[in-house]
């Protein structure tokens, strides 16, 4: 029986629950020293001096590094697709303060407690400069993103004449929405352990990273050594959600500190330090204008985005990626603007861009359905596209209609009273809403290695990471299935820059890229073993033992020109039920149903888990999550898990997940499309549309807190 498609338990589960799994801060080293950062307390300006006298008197202090005595770094490269355009922070290299909570010094000591206490004793003087923090002030100076800044992402492009068509459309809606900045808040804190060899020419780093080989390249460039002399290790990640896609300043600082003290150094950011030391989903304002005929056929879409950015580099997202392809429409305009303020640079968070853009688009589609007095489901079904009109390519496959009808049936949508405010459960207002979900099915080059030993052991390796979606398990599944072995007979190695090349562990591309490479390596390995034995079938373990030698094979996957021949997209539909307390304006999500067309599902158990996590993230986006920044100082007001609210089990309702059977023979490889991101996309607008249906109030500002609902 094929292992592909079987709901097998996680192979890494026992290591995680027993503590055998080592994360970035868990790796031991002889003579380990500990580091603590000092962060800026102004949002913009220059450092005029440090008073280190009190900090230097703390017992155990080994070194205090500032821009005045830290090692000089080389140019840090931009490596697509995760690095923004511009000049990234070069930590401890000059006196310039770019944002609040910037790392401006580091203390290295014998113990963590000594390092943190000494860091609190470092006194810093500044020459502050006027800083722009308030978003309303920032918006007044927003500008169009340049071609270089927006790169290959949709924006400032379109088709047809949206403005002229909107002016003559039979029915129009004009929807303005705002999404607050969100932080990823993984459970594992960001950490780096760095160790140089005795001659200072080789660096080993245990880092929380979603791309070990990119991390090696960045560190090699920064310290002027070839990347092959940098060994980055990270087999387990305790959640990331995009927060570890790029190399952050603390990683360079840990390596600098280790070089100066000549000992291994461990640097772990506190939860509060993480808010300024990494990125976040950017604050975004969107205006969506739709024009349609009276039968609901879309004639024009104008989707305008303005997103926050730092001053020192520009990070743009695929906010407008879904808009030109989700619905059939001849006239589409997609302006993208950037609003610069004195904050740390935003970065990708689960469902980057599309979670934001689909929220605004699906809010507007719901408003259009109300204006047309039309069922929101019927409106979506009427406008399903036959092909990707933006690329003028056929879809490799599209199951959007099946997702909509299947999810609607499971949810019981036909029992919905379409009049807003008409449904009740006792004294509570009851609302049902829905939205469409979408995420590109990206596939990139990847390599893998498979080996069988004379002892009859199979080892498979690729450099990919695993931040929680189940890479350990799904890749083992592919290898075991290809070699006709049991799961426990395959030993997998991942999360190591010395292993065969793998892409960034993000963008829902992992199994679709490294899975085919692993399969190719295992097929070649099987062929080599069979060829040596002169057979066409048999147990490769027994054959290798009988022959008495090791066999090894390299495998690769290259999508070639797939993107030039097909538009490869995953689609889904999300339906949500909410209750609203009319006295307190408290919103509770009671249930969510999601149906997804994502090609072949390697492991339904892991896939369902991904969807449950995505739905919980969508609940957080809709009702709870926002990073509060003091508009005067730029300080993070709620930089902790006590005041930055994320969904808990008490906030989690009944979650129903189903996968529409989809055989996509055009996407190559395993026929998979990826799942991690699409599970979040569409959840927040489904909840927002349900709140409107319950109350008749259209909340356009996420999160939808009780005070915002009460004032609507």
Image (cartoon, rainbow, N blue to C red):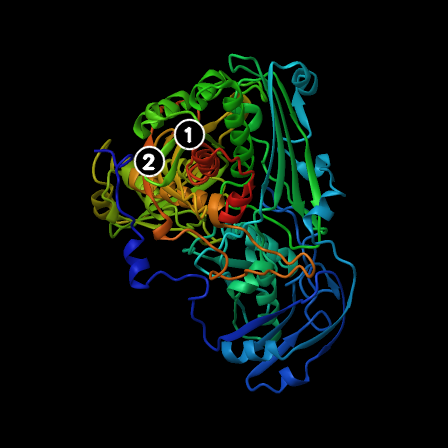
- Front one among 472 and 391: 391
Q: Quadrant of residue 353?
A: top right
Q: Earlier in the sequence, mark 2 or mark 1?
A: 1
Residue at point 47%, 46% (across, down): 623
What is the C-alpha distance between the residues marked 2 and 1?
Answer: 11 Å
* Lateral position of residue 148 relative to residue 379, left or right: right
Q: Position of residue 634 (x, y in %)?
A: 66, 59
- Front one among 388 and 446: 388
* Lateral position of residue 394 relative to residue 335, left or right: left
- Front one among 64 and 693: 693
Task: Look at the image and tell me in which quarter the N terminus lies.
Answer: top left
Does dot 2 land on a helix, a strand or a loop? Answer: strand
* Lateral position of residue 227 relative to residue 613, left or right: right
371 to 342, vertically: above or below: above
Task: Look at the image and tell me in which quarter the C terminus lies.
Answer: top right
Residue at point 57%, 59% (across, down): 275
């Amino acid at each position: 029986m094929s292992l592909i498609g079987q709901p097998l338990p996680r192979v890494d589960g026992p290591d995680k629950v027993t503590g055998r799994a080592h994360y970035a801060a868990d790796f031991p080293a002889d003579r380990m020293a500990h580091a603590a950062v000092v962060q800026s307390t102004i949002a913009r300006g220059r450092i005029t001096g440090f008073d280190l006298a009190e900090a230097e008197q703390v017992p155990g202090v080994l070194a205090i590094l500032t821009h005045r005595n830290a090692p000089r770094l080389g140019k840090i490269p931009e490596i697509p697709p995760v690095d923004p355009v511009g000049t990234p922070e070069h930590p401890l290299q000059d006196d310039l303060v770019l944002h609040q909570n910037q790392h401006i010094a580091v203390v290295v000591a014998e113990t963590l407690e000594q390092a943190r206490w000494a860091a609190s004793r470092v006194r810093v003087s500044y020459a502050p400069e006027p800083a722009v923090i308030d978003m309303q002030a920032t918006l007044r100076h927003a500008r169009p993103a340049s071609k270089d800044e927006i790169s290959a992402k949709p924006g400032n492009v379109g088709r047809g004449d949206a403005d002229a068509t909107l002016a003559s459309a039979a029915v129009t809606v004009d929807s303005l929405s705002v999404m607050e900045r969100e932080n990823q808040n993984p459970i594992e804190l960001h950490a780096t352990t760095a160790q140089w060899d005795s001659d200072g020419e080789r660096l080993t780093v245990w880092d929380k990273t979603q791309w070990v080989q990119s991390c090696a390249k960045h560190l090699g460039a920064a310290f002027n050594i070839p990347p092959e002399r940098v060994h980055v290790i990270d087999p387990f990640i305790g959640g990331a959600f995009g927060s570890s896609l790029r190399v952050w300043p603390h990683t360079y600082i840990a390596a600098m500190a280790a070089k100066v003290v000549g000992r291994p150094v461990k640097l772990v950011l506190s939860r509060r330090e993480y808010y300024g030391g990494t990125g976040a989903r950017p604050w975004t304002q969107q205006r969506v204008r739709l024009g349609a005929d009276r039968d609901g056929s879309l004639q024009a879409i104008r989707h305008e985005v303005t997103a926050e950015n730092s001053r020192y580099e520009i990070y743009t997202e695929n906010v407008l990626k879904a808009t030109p392809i989700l619905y059939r429409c001849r006239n589409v305009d997609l302006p993208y603007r950037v609003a610069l303020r004195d904050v740390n640079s935003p970065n990708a968070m689960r469902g980057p861009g599309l979670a934001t853009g689909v929220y605004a688009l699906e809010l507007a589609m719901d408003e259009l359905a109300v204006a047309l007095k039309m069922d929101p489901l019927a409106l979506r079904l009427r406008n399903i596209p036959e092909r990707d009109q933006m690329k003028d390519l056929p879809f490799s496959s599209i199951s959007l209609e099946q997702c909509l009808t299947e999810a609607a049936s499971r949810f019981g949508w036909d029992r919905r009273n379409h009049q807003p405010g008409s449904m009740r459960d006792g004294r509570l207002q009851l609302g049902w809403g829905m939205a469409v979900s979408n995420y590109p099915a990206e596939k990139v080059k990847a390599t893998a290695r498979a080996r069988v030993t004379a002892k009859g052991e199979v080892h498979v390796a690729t450099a990919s990471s695993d931040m929680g979606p189940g890479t350990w398990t799904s890749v083992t599944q592919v290898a075991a299935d290809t070699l006709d072995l049991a799961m426990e007979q395959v030993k997998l190695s991942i999360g190591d820059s010395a292993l065969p090349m793998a892409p960034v562990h993000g963008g829902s591309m992992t199994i679709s890229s490294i899975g085919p490479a692993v399969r190719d390596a295992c097929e070649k390995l099987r062929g080599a073993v069979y060829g040596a034995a002169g057979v066409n079938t048999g147990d490769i373990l027994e054959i290798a033992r009988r022959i008495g030698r090791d066999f090894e094979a390299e495998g690769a996957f290259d999508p070639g020109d797939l993107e030039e021949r097909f538009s490869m997209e995953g689609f889904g539909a999300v339906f949500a039920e909410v209750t609203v307390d009319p006295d307190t304006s408290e919103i509770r999500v009671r249930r969510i149903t999601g149906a997804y067309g994502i090609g072949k599902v390697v492991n339904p158990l892991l896939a369902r888990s991904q969807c449950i996590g995505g739905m919980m993230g969508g609940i957080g986006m809709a009702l709870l999550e926002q990073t509060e920044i003091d508009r005067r100082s730029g300080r993070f007001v709620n930089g902790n898990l006590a005041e930055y609210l994320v969904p808990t089990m008490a906030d989690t309702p009944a979650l129903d997940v189903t996968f529409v059977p989809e055989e996509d023979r055009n996407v190559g490889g395993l026929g998979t499309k990826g799942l991690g991101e699409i599970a979040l996309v569409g959840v927040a607008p489904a909840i927002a549309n349900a709140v409107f249906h319950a109350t008749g109030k259209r909340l356009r500002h996420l999160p939808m807190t009780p005070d915002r609902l009460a004032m609507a």
